[in-house]
Amino acid sequence: MSSLAKEERAALASALRRVGPDAPTLCEGWDASDLAAHIVTRDARPDAMVGKSLPFVGGKAKKAIEQIEDLDFTELVQRIEAGPPSYSPARLSPVNDLVNATEFYVHTEDVLRAQPDFDPEHPRRVSEELSKKLWNVNAETMLRAAAYKRRERITYFSPGFGAITVGRSKDPLVTVQGRPEEIVLWAFGRHEKAQVIVTVA
């Protein structure tokens, strides 16, 4: 069985290569090169991402991140395509899909939907298998977190996939309807680009 995260990793690399290092993304303050460096750091040095804010190890962690950020854009994309190091648990397909399918899907859309030629009428189509994975993985995590962050009680409804209601009972009621992948983009803060219908009770 193919890995959904592996497929989305390839899609991300392709999108980055197409737009080039200076292209905008939906990640505030990041161009395509910054996003690529983030993925490479996440793959190879997740310890550095965590450690940069810690005493004693912060300096070394920042240096490790800077070394990755200094890499040529072409090499960054090649490293993304190559995947995590052999010792990474993400080399196992079940682990990879759990921790990376959402990450790579969202960041691929961060690249594609930030471009001037993006056509909202014809977004990238994803497989039903990926849609289902995004719904199942995020239903009790990011979707719930978004409701609490926004201080809203949100019903997420995706025809064919289901509905869940999360958030504090005292908060205002909101319904977010759309395909799972679009709901996930909305929950990750890409409100202007996510193709969902938001209804306030």
Image: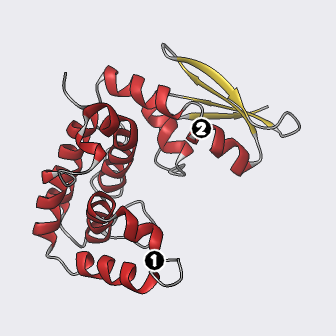
Please give left or right for residue 76 compared with residue 128 in the image.
left
Residue at mark 2: 143
Residue at mark 1: 52
**Residue 179 image point, x, y percent:** 46, 27
Res. 123 visible in picture: no
At 41% from the left edge and 86% from the top edge, which residue is drawn? 59
Residue at the top extreme of this rendering: 160
At 40% from the left edge and 27% from the top edge, which residue is drawn? 133
**Residue 128 image point, x, y percent:** 33, 20
**Residue 121 image point, x, y percent:** 35, 36
Q: Is residue 72 above or below residue 133?
A: below
Please give left or right for residue 154 compared with residue 173 in the image.
left
SS class, disc 2 = helix
How crowded is the residue under tag 2: few (<14 C-alpha within 10 Å), some, or many (20+)?
Answer: many
Amino acid type assigned to the residue bearing label 2 in the image = Leu
At 46% from the left edge and 72% from the top edge, which residue is drawn? 51
Res. 114 visible in picture: yes
User: Which is more toward the observer, 17 or 136?
Assistant: 136
